[in-house]
Amino acid sequence: MVLPDISLLQAAIVLAEELHFGRAADRLNMSQPTLSKQIFRLERSVGLRLFEHQHQAAELTPAGEVFLAEAREVVFHAERAILSARAVIDGSTEILNVGKSSYMDPFLVSILQSIQLPLFPAMKIKLWSNYSNVLAQQVIAGTLDVALITGVPQKSKLSTLEIATNPYYVAMQTGDELAAYQEVRLQQMERRLWMLLGPHINAYLYDQIQTVAADKEVYPTDIYHFTSPEEASGLVREHHGLTLLPRAAAWRIARDGITIRPLAEDRLRLVTSLAVRADSKSRLLNEFVKAAGRKLSEVAQRRQSRLPLTG
C-alpha cells in the first residue's frame, strides 16, 4: 500500500473543516481547480470516496469522516517530528510571555503553567503580573503574548476567549447580620459602608458597580478605596463595612473573624478571559490558546460548582 502525500492530507483536512472548495482553496493559497485535483488524487490513491461534491459545497462521506480523523493525527505527528528535531538541532527555546492579575485565581494560573505543546517541546512560560486593564494594553502593544484578564470590556484589537464568569464576593465580619444569608443581594447593602478596589485599578468595574447601584437606588453611607485584599481586611475590621472582591481575593482574607458570601446580582459578574492580539498569526500562540481554553474551561466549570461558603 502506497501512503498518500502529506500535502494531500493537509488539503483534505482544510476542506473537511470548511466544507466549501472556495474557502478551503483560499486558506491553502491555491486555486479551486488545484484543490479539486488534489482531493481527486487523494481519493484515487486510497481507493475511497471521501467527499460528496456539489458545486462549491463538499460533504464528508462516512468513510471520509473516519479517514480524516486519522489523517489529522498523521499530520500532527509529522509536524511534531519536524519541529522537535529542529528544536534539538537549534537548541532553541520558545518564550511565551503570559500576563496575569494578582487577583487571579492561582489555580487557573497554575493550569496555564502546566500546558505542554507537543509541537513546541521547548516552550517556556514567563509570567508577568499587573492589573487586568494594564495587561490588556500590554497584549495590544505586543509586550505580552497572552494574558488572563478579568473585567475588561471588548476591544477591537483584542481577541478574547471567555474562561469563567463568577460573582463578586462580599467580605464582612462573621458577626455581621448579612452573614446569616447564603448570598447577599445588592439591596441588602443599602446604607452600609462599602470598601471597593480603587478606580485606578479597574475604572470599568468601578463605574459598573456605581451604575448598577444607582439604577437600583442603592447607596452606601460612604466608600473607602483599597488596592489589596489584605488592606480591605483591615478596613472591614476597623469600620465594620462590606467589601466587594473577586473570588480568589476574597478567599485570601476569609479568616480571623472575616467571612464571605457571593453577591447575587446578575449585572455585576466578573468575566475572566484569555486575551491575545486580534491580528496574531503565531502558530505557537494559536496552539497555546486552544490548549489553554480547553483546560481552563473544564477546570473553571468544575470548581465553580464546588466552592463552599466559609463560616
Image: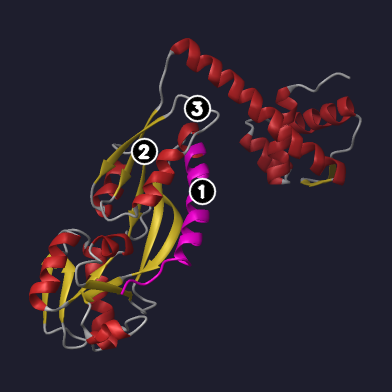
Residue matched to label 3: 120
Task: Determine whether, in the image, residue 170 is placed left or right of residue 183.
Answer: left
Residue matched to label 2: 145
Task: Determine whether, in the image, residue 157 is placed left or right of residue 63.
Answer: left
Residue drawn where x is 87% and y is 25% of the image: 45
Q: Earlier in the sequence, mark 1 or mark 2?
A: 2
> Is residue 305 on the magenta stretch?
yes
The amino acid type, in three-letter code, at marker 2 is: Asp
Distance Cα–Cα, label 3 vs label 2: 15 Å
Report the magenta residues as a range. 287-311
Q: Nearer the viewer, mark 1 or mark 3?
A: 1
Residue 74 x %, y %? 71, 28
Q: Nearer the viewer, residue 292 or 4?
A: 292
Residue 255 x %, y %? 23, 66
Residue matched to label 1: 295
The amino acid type, in three-letter code, at marker 1 is: Lys
Element under disc 1: helix
The amino acid type, in three-letter code, at marker 3 is: Phe
